[in-house]
Image (tube, rainbow, N blue to C red):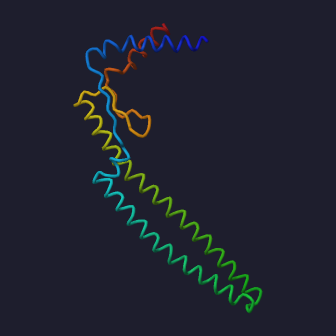
Amino acid sequence: MKRVWVLLWSWVFLLAWLLPALATEPLKIAYVDIQKALNFCEAGKEAKKLITAEVEKMQKNFSGKQKELEKIKEDLEKRGAVLSESVRKERERDYQAKLVALQRLQRDYEEDLRRRDRELTDRILKTMEEIVKKMGEEGKYTVILEKNQPTILYISPVLDLTEEVIKRIDQKQK
């Protein structure tokens, strides 16, 4: 119950603090669909082309190695009964080692693609963040939200209570 009262009074205090700031400027809220912006901006389209090209290149290399491994397996299945025990076991070990190497290669490819995609996306998102901030300042927006997630992309510095909170904490400590 005590927590509810503390929370209630916190909201009252916050509103009392914000009302004068909001009275001087009209409340202006907007949102941005970051995913749509990523998909349809030229930088996003170019990044998608780069990733697609890398995927095709890696798939071509991977499928070649996969075919080679399938041939080894087929040969082992066809000739396995005719080969001596030691030769057959040696070829099975060779096949297993190549299979493990192929699986490792696939994981490495996937990891490289994820890393590359993340790098390209992060670069575009950083540029978008700067643009949204500039638009927020120029358009005198109070808050700009991200459409698909509860993320604030820009908030007017007028609403920032951080310095006041720091002063009050310092005062309370004294």
Residue 12 x, y percent position in the rendering: 44, 11
Q: In the figure, residue 46 lies in which quadrant?
A: bottom left
As drawn, is 19 to the left or to the right of 86?
left
**In the rendered image of this protein, does residue 39 appear above or below residue 74?**
above
Tell me which residue sits at (54%, 80%) in the image: 67
Q: Residue furthest left?
A: 138
**In the rendered image of this protein, does residue 85 appear above or below residue 31?**
below
Residue 94 vs residue 14, the one in the foreground: 14
**In the rendered image of this protein, does residue 166 appear above or below residue 113?**
above
Q: In the figure, residue 51 lies in which quadrant?
A: bottom left
Tell me which residue sits at (74%, 92%) in the image: 82
Tell me which residue sits at (73%, 91%) in the image: 83
Q: Residue furthest bottom?
A: 82
As drawn, is 23 to the left or to the right of 93?
left
Which quadrant holds the N terminus? top right
Tell me which residue sits at (29%, 39%) in the image: 130
**In the rendered image of this protein, does residue 3 appear above or below residue 64?**
above
As drawn, is 97 to the left or to the right of 13?
right
Residue 159 vs residue 171, the one in the foreground: 159
Residue 164 x, y percent position in the rendering: 39, 14
Residue 91 x, y percent position in the rendering: 68, 83
As drawn, is 14 to the left or to the right of 64?
left
Residue 148 x, y percent position in the rendering: 42, 40
